[in-house]
Image: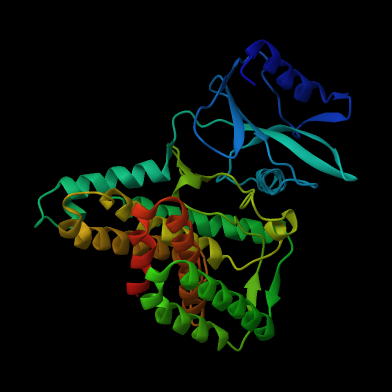
Amino acid sequence: MHDASLTCHLLHGMDDDRRANGVAFHSAPHAAIDTSQRSLVLTAEQSNTSLVYGDAYIFKLFRQLNPGVNPELEIVSALAEAGSTHVARPYGWMDTELDGEPTTLAILQEYLPNANDGWTMALTSVRDLYASPGEMPAEDAGGDFVAEACRLGEATAQVHRELAEAFPTGTIEPPEIKRMTERFRRRLEKAVAEVPALAEHADVAAQAFDRMADIEHEIPVQRVHGDYHLGQVMRTTADWVVLDFEGEPGQPLSERRAPDSPLRDVAGMLRSFDYAARHLLAGHPGADELEGRAREWSARNKSAFLAGYSQGGGRIRGDDAILLRALELSKAVYEVVYEARNRPSWLPIPLAAFGEE
């Protein structure tokens, strides 16, 4: 991957739809690939290896293979074919046969050289707020993110609508909702046993799960992103673009492709706003004084995102708010365990979720 004299053959292979030694190269419909571009390996830590070809393409090689078509290729291809403006255009891909199934090895997509990722933009806004005088309203601090959070909510709703049009949809009946709630409860019990600091907050999550179990009507489900947060979105000069539809790499492919409530993506983004607001407080000498500002930033941007999601046609009404709250806290329970195992200094971030409404 680090030898540009070799990686040029990847572009040629996709452009020519080659097949060799069990590996098939494919070009996307109507895609013209510029094979003169030279590659550079991205150094950012991630679960895949990515090459950037000039300012034109990004080539993502999947290091962990699961038999079957990768959801990233499946979803981006379908949305691009439908004319979506919120995905990076696919140009080609590679696959092979694994356990008797066509299995995605890599995907070539449009590179967005002048775009900014949502996480970096949000952190810039938070830093500006923390550096402003304490009496200054958040909306007057430099780099306010609220307008972008609203636009991101609209883009998210549009992507969900496009996913519902491109793939089959369905519903979850009340008995399945109750089974889902039981899984949330078991996860909470295991988390409390592993992380004692969660015990004093467990009742908040348990009550949210109880309200979810009482939902007595069906819930719509569809294809979703599955691992949605500020690091998965890029702001171009025109709009927000959503990346990495492959879901959580550690989960089985069947689970990543299964229909789910779109509110799971919404919950993931809301948790990401909390992380953006608070992760700079870890080890900060003025953390106690800035906690109120963190809550304010998170609340304002969550509200703006939800408003944009509703304006874009996303559904959050009635019992949807109950389901969303349960999904948020279930995600926070997972985060508590993760931070306790990997970044103990960040543990206060997910614990703060249980004190918010």
Name which quarter of the figure residue 119 lies in: top left
Residue 218 visible in the picture: no
Tell how many labels: 0
Q: Where residue 306 sits in the image (x, y, percent)? A: 41, 65
Q: Where residue 157 sits in the image (x, y, percent)? A: 52, 60
Along the viewing direction, whichever of 47 and 50 lies nearer the viewer: 47
Q: Quadrant of the N terminus?
A: top right
Along the viewing direction, whichever of 209 and 71 lies nearer the viewer: 209
Q: Is 4 situated left or right of 129 in this image?
A: right
Q: Is 304 situated left or right of 262 in this image?
A: left
Along the viewing direction, whichever of 184 and 32 lies nearer the viewer: 184
The residue under the point 34% across, 47% down is 122
Q: Where residue 39 sits in the image (x, y, percent)? A: 60, 18
Name which quarter of the figure residue 289 lies in: bottom left
Name which quarter of the figure residue 308 lies in: bottom left
Q: Where residue 331 sits in the image (x, y, percent)? A: 49, 65
